[in-house]
Amino acid sequence: MKRSLRGRFILFLCGILTMTMLFGTAVLADGVDTSTFDFSDTQLTISQGDQASISIRAKYDYDVYIVGNRSKYTYVKTDNQSGDGTVTFVIGPDETSNSIQFWFYARNHGDIFDHVQVDVNVATKPVLSIGVSPNVSEGLQSAPISLPDGTVGYATLVSGNLLCFVVDAAGNPLATFSVLDTNGKLLPMELGATIPAANGINYLHVDTDEGTKVIDVAITAVDRQKLMIRGIAGLYLNHKFVAWK
């Protein structure tokens, strides 16, 4: 009788262990809050010109913004749909950034987001085409920003260059802004090297096709305050200094 009870107890323990193992393999790893975005990996290392894929489980449809890349050939492949899927990160062969963040925003739920960091194995320096100067500072997709604490943030163009996305050194979102013409139409932007001013103050260098024509900058009061705290006083817009209003 005692042997029978012991046998049943051992079988009970084995059953619990088996269930634990099964349930453990069914849940995607990583991520603090996995109720909205659940990634199989949140930090990868990919070499120049290479790519890697991870699994994703998303509660909502989503958009992906790339921050920190310096190559226009660095991009992400995904269906942007809720449910289970695959995300592929493609690193341009001329990518020189050592770290890139891919930010996932739940569509129509702007306060819900998560990110995956990709460390780039930069093996060689990019080969410049004939006639291209290595000192070109305009027409950038992403521009570094020296912050008052000695770290480096980034301003990156997204949404067809109609929106500028600004993050700190850790990739945390600081602000977004757009540039409009006199009719309120969003204008495509180009970035240049950040312009330093006195006492650690910086101006983000932005150009549009409108030249020196009168235009407006759309930015929320909260985002404007976040940038001013970090020494970003406004834009060097079409070669004119424009302080935040």
Image (cartoon, rainbow, N blue to C red):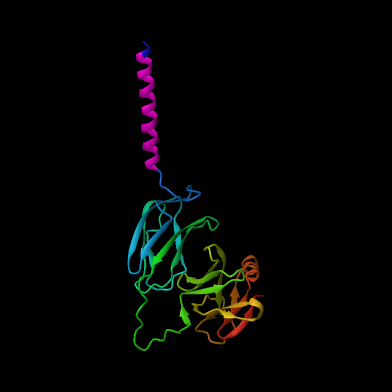
Q: Position of residue 52 (x, y in %)?
A: 34, 60
Above or below for 120 versus 113: below
Q: Which residue sits at x=55%, y=73%?
A: 145
Is 18 covered by the magenta stretch?
A: yes
Quadrant location of the N terminus in the rendered image: top left
* Residue 25 left/right relative to 210: left
Main SS of the magenta part reads: helix
Q: Is residue 173 left or right of residue 231?
A: left
Q: Residue at x 38, y 24 (%)?
A: 12
> Which contiguous range is marked in magenta?
3-26
Residue 94 percent across, percent down from the top left: 36, 74
The answer to whether one can see residue 182 in this image is no
Res 91 visible:
yes
Q: Name the one closer to the observer, 127 or 25.
A: 127
Instruction: Tell me where residue 123 appears, x and y as whole percent.
Output: 35, 70
- Quadrant assignment, res 8: top left
Q: Is residue 83 magenta?
A: no
* Left or right relative to 73: residue 175: right
